[in-house]
Amino acid sequence: MKKHPFFGVVVATAILSPLMLLGIFSIGKGWPFPKIFPENWSLQNWSDAFTASSGLGQSLGLSLGIGACVAFLATISGFFSARSLAKSSRKNTWLMLAYLPYVLSPVMYAACLQVSFLFLGISGKITGVMLGHFLLAYPFAVILFTGFWNARMEAMAQLAATLGANPVSSYLKVLFPVAKGVLFVCFFQTFLLSWFEYGLTVLIGVGKVPTLTVKVYQYVTEANIHLAALAGCLLVLPPTLMLWINKRYLFTRITL
Amino acid sequence: MKKRTLTAGLAFFLCWTALPLILGVGYALLYSVGLVGLLSEGFTLVYWQRVLTHAEFWVDLGYSLSLAAGAMLLATGIALRLVLKHRHSFKQGLLSYLIYLPLAFPAVVAAFLTFQLLGPRGFFSRIALSAGLIATPEQFPAMIHDSWGTGILLTHMAMAVPFLVLLFIHTWENERLDELGQLAQTLGAARRSRTWRVEVPVLIRSSRPTLVLYFLFVVGSYEIPLLIGRESPQMVSVLAIRKLQQYDLTARPEAYIVVLIYLLLVAVLLRTLLVSPTNPKQP
């Protein structure tokens, strides 16, 4: 296969330029037309971001907290219930159900669920947003783990039982160590689902739960491009680092 | 595994997937026929009649489907070209890491960037002005809030290309297309036939479920058209949520009808597009 010397440079530039532009906008001050780049440069936006008045620091903490809790709960519950699903004779039908929140579109799903959250008194609250995110993340975890619970894993569990392991030690000493990789991938993916979610967060949170995605939208509508870029950087950087570290695990599990 | 544990696992799954959906869809259905809600006056099909006979919904649905199909066709074409010609560049070196970077961009940030890049006073417009290609920002081609949804299409395409490149590379290795292609050439296939009769069909067929799901994901996308789309025509998700959030409460049943029709359409598309012709039981 013929190698094109400039191909790598062109693709790398195309991939890196959005991140660089976000960085440039986030440290810029004032961008009057027709200047190509901002007039002044300062790190003040970044230092102001974490003061109480801007609220970006709180939003970062909120997004991290919601994402971590949702990912943990979805991963654990998905791991156990996927085993039941994998053994069911109607596995494909149940899996189709798990895809619905995504193909229906999370925001349309949230529109249907909104009244239930109002009825439960958790609309506009962090717990409501967390539950909403869980309803998206949990089916995803189930889809991911259904592939894990194959005949080989069941044979391994049976072997552990034959050798005298009770169900708890079978999980702790055999199944969890074997599943370490996929558990991590699931945690990471479900964390991202929650971290990136905007439509459902706004509908269920009625704008009172200011996660980072909500903040980006708010700054864009206020035409505050520098803070929007800064919030965008905060949104992009953690998943970028995690993706970079874990790329070898990632893609084998996200395709069908 | 005991049968009781199996049943409990399945019940837990249904409780967090089917139950919310049934409750939500049930409520939407009752609202759409006037049986619940603040303005409920008993059973009526007037809202259904209003939505189904109004051109707005059909135009927006067609607009969403066309934009998604356009974005997917372009992205699939570009990704196929990249994988067929340059797949080795993505398997080693810096590009093997960088290709994952666009996956870390949420839709809301991608839309914001598109706005800043392609808007009439955006980055490219300023470059065109300073290069003397245009005299005023209004002369820059409209790609944001335009009726063709150019910005929406380009943003979805840009987000889909890296994902599809990774998908096709993964499929290429899974299907052992290097060996299969060599076999085809040994049996007399020309380089062109090897590409178009072996590699591309295998890549598309094996990736079909993911392509279909990605297409449906784009049809129902919300953040990107909300930020860089216009009000008419608009993507179907934006239409539903705008109707739901209007002060006029009579628009609320219409919002639920849009959601219900969309759900029905998605179910039909899933069933039609995902069922494999060789194995009808496989979703």
Image: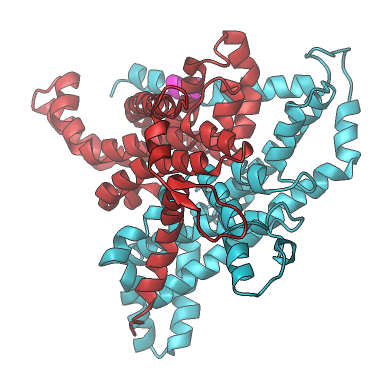
In this view, the residue in front, B247 or B219, is B247
Q: Residue at x 57, y 16 (%)?
A: A124
- Answer above or below: position of A105 versus B170: above
Compared with residue B264, is residue A247 higher up or lower down, i.e. above or below?
A: below
Q: Name the image quarter holding residue B108.
A: top right
Query: Was residue A13 drawn as part of the magenta stretch in this picture?
Result: no
Chain B: drawing colour: cyan
Q: Is residue B82 left or right of residue B281?
A: left
Q: How many marks?
A: 0
Residue A66 appears anywhere in the view? yes
Q: Which residues are magenta?
A: B10-16
Residue at left 57%, top 40%?
A224
Of helix, strand and loop, which mostly describes the magenta segment? helix
Q: Residue at x 46, y 22 (%)?
A: A130
* Location of residue B12 in the rendering, given as x and y in whole percent from the top left corner: 43, 20
Residue B183 quadrant: bottom left
Q: Outermost residue, left direction?
A: A163
Q: Nearer the viewer, residue B231 or B189?
A: B231
In the picture as drawn, the residue positioned furthest to the front comes out as A40
Instruction: Tell me residue A53's x, y (percent).
Output: 47, 23
Tell me the shade of chain A: red
Percent position of residue B220, x then y = 63, 43
In the image, B246 versus B78, the foreground residue is B246
